[in-house]
Image: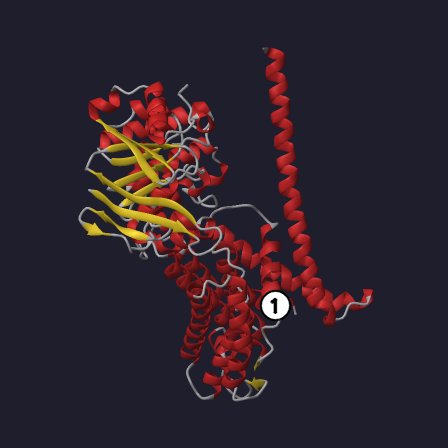
Amino acid sequence: MIEGIFVEGLIFSVMALGILISYRILDIADLTCDGSVATGAAVAAICITNGWSIPAAMVLAFIAGVLCGLCTAAIHNHLHIPGLLAGILTMTMLYSVNLRILGNKANVPLVRVDTMYDFFHQIFAFMPQAFASLAGTLLMVLVVKVIFDLFFRCDMGVAIGALGGNEQVVISLGMNVSTLKYIGLGLSNGLIALSGAMLAQYQGFADANLGQGMVVQGLAAIMLGEFLFRSNRISLITLRVILGSIIYKGLMFLGRRYGYLVGITPNDFKLLTGLLVIISLIIASTRTKMAEDKARKEAVARVMEDKKNA
Amino acid sequence: MLDIKHVTKVFFPGTVNEKVALQDINLHINEGDVVCVIGSNGSGKSTLFNMIAGTFPVTAGTITLDGKDITKAPEYKRAFEIGRIFQDPTKGTSANMSIQDNMALSLRKGMRGLKYSLNQEKKNFFRQILEPVGLQDRLEDNVGLLSGGQRQALTLIMACMSHPKLLLLDEHTAALDPANARIVMELTEKYIAQEKFTAMMITHNMQFAIEFGNRLIMMDEGKIILEASGDEKRNLTVPDLIARFREIRNKDFADDEGLLTEGN
C-alpha cells in the first residue's frame, strides 16, 4: 500500500517537474498540462497496444508532449496572447486530439500487453512486485531529475531561468526570447506527457479525462515541497518537487483512507487540492510580509539608535 | 561608427494621442566618442536610446552601426553589439538567480548551447572583477538580495564583460543614492577609459555632462538643439548651457530648470 503512494508520487513528480519549468522557471501559467498529460498517456497506450516497444512508446509520448508545448508557445509568441490563454486554447483543442489518438474512445485499457511495470517486475524479480515497481519508477525519476538538473546548469538552461526572472536581461544578452520559450514550454510539456505515459502504464489504462485538474495538483505538490527547505540550487529545488509530490499523494491517500471519518469523499479532492494551493499561497505571502515587517522594525530601531548616539 | 539619419518617431500615429517624439534626428558618432545627452523630461532622450537599441521600431529614417544597417534588426540581435544599462537597477540582472549564474550568462552574446555553465576558472575570474565593488564573496547569493547600487554595479560589469561596440547608459545612476551613484559612476569612467568604449550617456546633471566625455548634445521637443565637442565643450559652463537653451528655444527655462540639476 505504502509503496503505491511512493510510485504514484514519483510518477506525479515527473509532471510536477514539467510544471516547475513553466510556472516557476519561465513564470508562465501554462494550462497545456491538463491536455498534454492525457496526450502522453494516450500516445503511450496506443503505441503499446499496437505492439511498439516500451522505450519507443515513451519517447513518442515525450515528443507528443513537446509538440503540445510548442503549440502553446507558438500561440503565445506569434499572436502575442498571454501564456494563460494560449495554454487554455491548446488544452481545449487537445481534448479532441486525445480522443482521436485513443481511436474515438474515452479510454483504452492496457491489459494483456506488457508495460513498463511488467518489465520492472522481470528485472527486479528478486523482490516483491510492489517493490519492483517502486524501484523501477525511482530509477526512472532519478534519471529524469539528473538530466533536468544538468540541463538547468548548462548555458541554455540558465538562460531559460533568467528569462523567467527578467525578460529584458535575456534580450540584452542577444537571445531570442521566443526561441527560449519554445524550448522551455516544449520540455515542460514533454516531461508532463512522459509522466502521463508512466501513469497510464501504472494504472493500466489511458483516459481522455486523465488530465483534469492536473495543473492545480502539480502546483500543490510544488508548493508543499517549498515548505520543506529554501534553496536556489536547482538540484535541491527538483528534490523538493519530488518530495512535495510524494507528500501530496500521501495526503490524498490519507484522505481516501480516513476521509470518510469526517465525511470527505474522493469527489471532494479537487476542492481540497485547490484549497491546499490557496493556503500555501497565503502562508507564503504571510511569511514574506512578516520578514518585511521584521526588517522594517529593525531598520527603524537602527535609525533611532544612530540618532541617540549622534 | 553609429550613423543616425533622418530618424523620426511618432507614437500612436493617427490617434488623438499622436505624439512626435523624435523629429528628423541626424547624428554621427565616431569610434571612441563618449557622448553626454542632456535635455528635460519628454525631450526624446530615452526615445532616441530606444530607437538605437531597437526597443521600438523607428517611424522613418535609418540607423547604421559599423556600416551595417540595423534599422529593422530586432532588439536581441542589436544587443550583440550594443550594451544598455537602464535607470531601473532591476532591469539589468535576473533577481532569482545567483550572481555567478548572471555573470556566466553575460560572458558572451547569442543563443546558448548545452555547455556546462560554470567552472572554477570562471568563478575565480568573477571574484577578481567583483573585487572593486566588494561582491567577491557573494557569488552564490541571489541577485535579489543586493542593494540597488550593488545591482547596478553588477549590471555595468556584466555589460562591459561582453565588450559591446556601443554602450548606452540611460541615466543609470539616477535611481541610486548619492554615495552609490558615485561608486557606479567611478566604475563607469574606469571601464570607459580602460576598454576605450564608445558610449552615450543620458544625464540630468549638466555640470557632469560638461566634465564627462568628449561630446555633448542637448535635446528638446524631439530635436537635437545643441551640439558641442572637444574644447568647445570643455569651456562650457552651466549658466552658458542655460543661456544657450534660452536663446535657441526662445522660451523660459524656468519650467525645465528643476529637471536639470546644475551639479552637486
Q: Can you give x and y, in whole percent of width and height, for residue A69 in the image?
A: 46, 68
Q: Nearer the viewer, residue A286 or A128?
A: A286
Pick the quarter of the image with the C terminus of chain A.
top right
Structure colour scheme: secondary structure
Disc 1 crowd, CA 10 A, few/some/many (<14, 14-19, 20+): some
Residue that appears at 29% across and 43% down: B25
Q: Nearer the viewer, residue B213 or A295?
A: B213
**Residue A126 appears in the rendering:** no
Q: Can you give x and y, in whole percent of width and height, for residue A12 in the image?
A: 56, 66
State the residue position of label 1: A3
Q: Can you give x and y, in whole percent of width and height, for residue B26 in the image?
A: 25, 42
Pick the quarter of the image with the N terminus of chain A.
bottom right
The chain to which mark 1 is attached is A
Q: Above or below — where is A271 with respect to B243?
A: below
Q: Quadrant of residue B138?
A: top left
Q: Above or below — where is B65 with respect to A191?
A: above
In the rendered image, the residue lying farthest to the top is A310
**Residue A119 appears in the rendering:** yes
Residue that appears at 50% across and 82% down: A45
Q: Report the amino acid beneath label 1.
A: Glu
Q: Above or below — where is A291 with respect to B186?
A: below
Q: Nearer the viewer, residue A45 or A294?
A: A294
In the rendered image, the residue lying farthest to the left is B67
